[in-house]
Image (cartoon, rainbow, N blue to C red):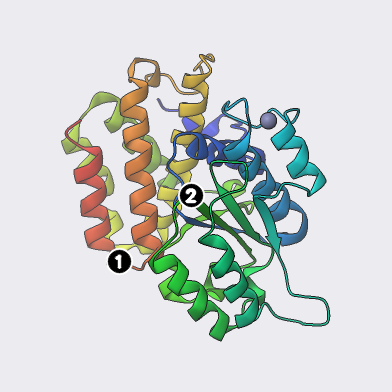
Amino acid sequence: MNKILSNKNQKGPDNIIKSLCLLAVEGELAHSILLETEDTAKKGLKSALCIAKTLLCHKQGKSPCNTCTACRKIDLGSHPDVKIVSAKPGYKAIRVDDIREIRLDAYLSPNESEYKIYIISDGGLINEQAQNVFLKILEEPPLNIKFIIICESKFLMLPTIRSRTQIFELGDEHNIKFSAKIKETINQILSAIVEKNDFALLKATAELVKNKDNFSKIIKELYYIISEICIQRTKNEDMKNYPGFNNISIKRLLKIRRAIIEIKDMINKNVNTQIAVCEFCIKLGGN
Ligand SMILES: [Zn+2]
């Protein structure tokens, strides 16, 4: 268990997208998700389309097949249930009228799929007035609707929208050079999970109540690590990077990942760090 972070784990953006696709397959994506990336036009859109394809792919695998009619239509931009929303020609912002149009359309059933998907190509372009109208849709989301908002920074969206949205960062934060102390804490947490040792978990996280920044970094990294482990386990891949995790059931792994996502949401919603750390220990301990 000591070398988990010293391995060259491939936690690049592609793996983040894979884990998002896995969430889509498991039906764990909220009505609204936000992909935070500086590269909204390429990386953001590519990721959003990949998630859309996974949701609508006829083969219903863990990633899009890229060959069925649904996947091909999405690639060609001709799928009637996948709409890319941008500022209208001649306008610099996505305006109230644009969001009202979506609102009317969103309550109509999908044309040929299980979901209707709206990809908002740049959330930063939705002006505040329009965001308030958008919020109304999120407060009473129509069935079978997914909004994928691509945005340079989640802080460009109103806090009320953020609190109803799952936020995923596609940046290169997985390349963060962790301090030795953070690496040690992550390894202690992973060991405590493997050994089902609640006391070790409490001990590893004790100091984090005073350090929101470190806790947030650790939760992000744990999210990538556990997602990667879930992907490897579901593909029956060799787990040599994560010794000890071979013996944990997929059901428990998914439960752990869900708990980490919930803690990530708490951090995004600015919940008090002491409460978030406490919740983390309750959710991950005792199972
Ligand atoms: Zn397909």
Instruction: Give the quadrant of residue 204.
Output: top left
The numbered mark, 2 or 1, whose residue comes first in the sequence reads 2
Tag 1 residue: 271
Name the residue located 30 percent from the left edge and 56 percent from the top edge.
208
Say above or below: 24 vs 110: above
Observer-nearest residue: 10 or 102?
Answer: 102
Say above or below: 32 vs 222: below
Q: Secondary structure at mark 2?
A: loop
Instruction: Give the quadrant of residue 40.
Output: bottom right
Q: Which of the two discs, 2 and 1, sits closer to the camera?
A: 2
Disc 2 to disc 1: CB gap under 8 Å: no
Q: Secondary structure at mark 1?
A: loop
Q: Is residue 206 visible?
A: no
Tell me: is circle 2 under 8 Å from ligand 1. Answer: no
Q: Is residue 106 left or right of residue 206?
A: right
Where is residue 278 drawn, in percent x and y?
A: 20, 53
Tell me: is circle 1 under 8 Å from ligand 1. Answer: no
Observer-nearest residue: 115 or 94?
Answer: 115
Where is residue 86 drawn, in percent x and y?
A: 72, 68
Distance from the alpha carbon under mark 2 to that under mark 1:
30 Å
Name the residue located 22 percent from the left edge and 28 percent from the top edge.
196
Which numbered dot is residue 144? Answer: 2
Say above or below: 100 vs 170: below
Q: Amino acid at mark 1?
A: Val
Q: Amino acid at mark 2?
A: Asn
